[in-house]
Amino acid sequence: MSYLKVLEHPLITHKLTILRDKDTNPALFKSTLASLTALMSHDLFSHLATQPVTITTPLEDMQTQKLAKPPVLVSILRAGNGMADSIFDICPEASMAHIGMQRDPDTHEPLFYYEKYPQDLSMRQCILIDPMLATGGSAIMAADRLKEKRVSDIVFACLVAAPEGVHAFHNAHSDVPIITAALDRELNENCYILPGLGDAGDRIFNT
């Protein structure tokens, strides 16, 4: 898989347009984000390993496939939950993990404050989730912590990425592919993505 995959689909573009609009209310923003994430899930799950099984249908036995190990969805709090919940609905066999970070308003650097993982984390694939890849600081720190716990199979998923964040993340974790709905133009002086969609966490949770 290429290190960066920008998903191109008319419905993804349409829903992203709704998310970008400053007049979209929080309820519509949250529901649109969930449906957009569901559209992205095909690509997010396309790399999962399967194993052969024999089952019995109402008519006969058959050979088929099932997940070898369900993935771990790793939400970067708090905005990551908006996407992770939608992915969890599609793959309820998955486990949910959380990494808590917040951005320092002066330095724009991520500050770590919380983490919770399943016990068999290192044996499973992790889908790292944050709606925005801006400077890349939070995603890099989160991937660092997963690798410290011996996770070797990671995919990073976001809605919107800035070139600066993609470059920084790839330099730090060249083995981790990025799947995004859009690659935007640049960061502004406050490290927000342009044209972007604002603060995803604030818009999800109406804060």
Image (cartoon, helix red, strand yellow):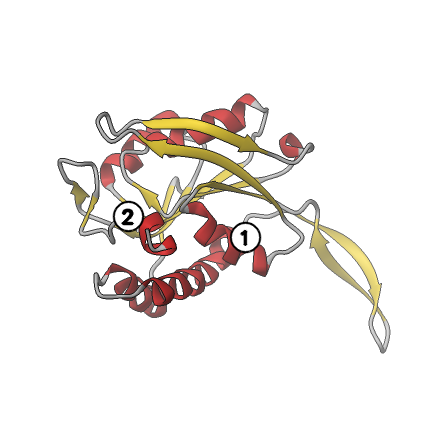
Nearer the camera: disc 1 or disc 2: 2
Q: Secondary structure at mark 1?
A: loop
Along the horizontal axis of the image, is 8 left or right of 67? left
Q: Position of residue 204 (x, y in %)?
A: 37, 55
Q: Position of residue 115 (x, y in %)?
A: 53, 31
Q: Position of residue 89 (x, y in %)?
A: 58, 60
Residue placed at 85% from the left, 78% from the top? 59
Q: How many marks?
A: 2
Q: Earlier in the sequence, mark 1 or mark 2?
A: 1
Residue placed at 54% from the left, 52% from the top? 45
Q: Residue furthest bottom?
A: 59
Along the horizontal axis of the image, is 205 left or right of 149? left
Quarter of the figure with residue 4: top left
Residues at circles 1 and 2 in contact by the CB criterion of under 8 Å: no
Alpha carbon distance from label 1 to label 2: 26 Å
Q: Residue furthest left?
A: 189
Quarter of the figure with residue 130: top left
Quarter of the figure with residue 165: top left
- Label 2 Cα neighbours within 10 Å, binned few <14 / some 14-19 / many ≥20: some
Judging by the rendered image, the residue that carries numbered circle 2 is 199
Q: Nearer the viewer, residue 206 or 138?
A: 206
The amino acid at mark 2 is Asp
Judging by the rendered image, the residue that carries numbered circle 1 is 45
Residue placed at 28% from the left, 33% from the top? 167
